Image (cartoon, helix red, strand yellow):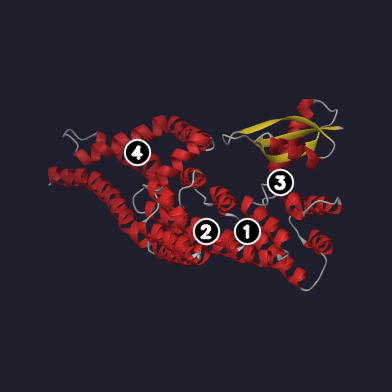
Amino acid sequence: MATYRFRAKDGQGYTVTGTIEADSPQEAAERLSAGQRVPLEIAEATDEADGGTGLRELWSRFNRQKVTLEELILFSRQMATLLRAGVPLIRALAGQVESVDNDRLREALQGARETLEAGRTLSDGLALYPDVFSALFVHMVRVGESSGNLEEVFDRMSGYLEQEKDTRDRARQAVRYPVMVVAAIAVAFIILNVFVIPQFVDMFSGLDAALPLPTQILIAISTTTRSLGWLILVVLVGTIFAARRYIGTARGRYRWDRLKLRLPIVGDIFTKLSMARFTRTFAITSRSGVPVMQGLNVVVGAVGNRYVGVVVEQIRNGVERGDSLANAARRSGVFPATVLQMLEVGEETGALDEMMEQVAAYYEREADLKIGNLSALIEPVLIAVIGAMVLLLALGIFLPMWDMSRALG
């Protein structure tokens, strides 16, 4: 029996580390899962000093490649093609191990292959790498193994991941322009206050008359920026770091995700994206034969919003008590009427997967439309900010010069 170091998520969402005795990494993962912990990383402990091991693990995490959606899409599509062509599962997986370029994905596929060769299932092997394969991916593979339609599952997952990638790409494209404009405004603000305005301060200091209010504001901002600039920068960086650490906690993530749904302009987009992910994930699990309770468990992690995930957990608890899915969702007060109506119709007709597919397509179109109009919605705000800065700068500089010219005249 060997000793393994592990990193896992506990029942409250906190990351815990430690060691565990087991005969294999698979057994270690099973024992962690039995203790209500989700394994994130399992590695055999060595006899080296803890400091050296800690530094090596820290460097390994820093240097580790992240598996992108594009790589998962390609993997899913190739697996579907190979299995549909009659290639044995172990042979198809071995080919993927040799062809992928991402070291982390290759490591995960190699581990899954070894698990498969040891007589266990592919889903068991994929579950050992939750940072690569999501709970939805693992559950879908497990359903495919049970039904014998593994190639169809990989095909559906490639389509699901492609939709997720398209949504993320459009969201990034929509916010790229506002972010660039805000960055340009920040750089211009710093240059003006540090290098330009101080040149006028010396010139205006010789005036006996009181300076206009815009000029006093410019001088005060410039003086504060130059004298307390480093302190402001440290406070800003510290605030951002503290906010990221807080959001990384279970409570912080819950509150931040709840706030995102209530933000002006973008809150509606986050809501529609959450509804689209909920309905799309629930549709694909229902269509693949996953029971409702297991499907809701998968949706909790795939919805992309912790606040909505907690609501889904409450819905699951209501269904466990014998309530219908539509009634449990209605009591949550989060889901729009469209989703509630389609849930009710789906339960009555037995076509829940089809109803959820239709709702998912609707909210994906709505989210795409909102994302496409995001720049148009934010642009007036940015123009107003730029206009206010230019007006303040013009008044602050030219009003004293105008008074000087009048006095000289």
**Disc 3 designates what residue?**
64
Mark positioned earlier in the residue sequence (2 or 1): 1
Disc number lying in front (4 or 3):
3
Cα–Cα gap, marks 3 and 1: 16 Å
Between 290 and 183, the residue placed more toward the observer is: 290
Q: Is residue 202 visible?
A: no
Q: Are marks 2 and 1 in contact (CB under 8 Å)?
A: yes
**Disc 4 designates what residue?**
198
Q: Secondary structure at mark 3?
A: loop
Cα–Cα gap, marks 2 and 3: 22 Å
Amino acid type shown at disc 4: Pro
**On residue 54, which mark appears?**
none
Q: Is residue 214 visible?
A: yes
Where in the figure is residue 406, as x and y percent of width and height?
Answer: 13, 46
Above-or-below relation of 193 to 1: below
Where in the figure is residue 280, as x and y percent of width and height?
Answer: 52, 60
**Disc 2 designates what residue?**
168
Where in the figure is residue 284, as x and y percent of width and height?
Answer: 57, 62
Disc number lying in front (2 or 3):
2
Local crowd size for mark 2, using a 10 Å CA cut-off: few (<14), some (14–19), many (≥20): few
Q: Viewed as shown, does residue 404 lie left or right of 246? A: left
Amino acid type shown at disc 3: Arg
Between 71 and 39, the residue placed more toward the observer is: 39
Q: Secondary structure at mark 1?
A: helix
Q: Secondary structure at mark 2?
A: helix
Amino acid type shown at disc 2: Arg
Local crowd size for mark 4, using a 10 Å CA cut-off: few (<14), some (14–19), many (≥20): some
Q: Viewed as shown, does residue 117 lie left or right of 278? A: right
Q: Are marks 4 and 2 in contact (CB under 8 Å)?
A: no
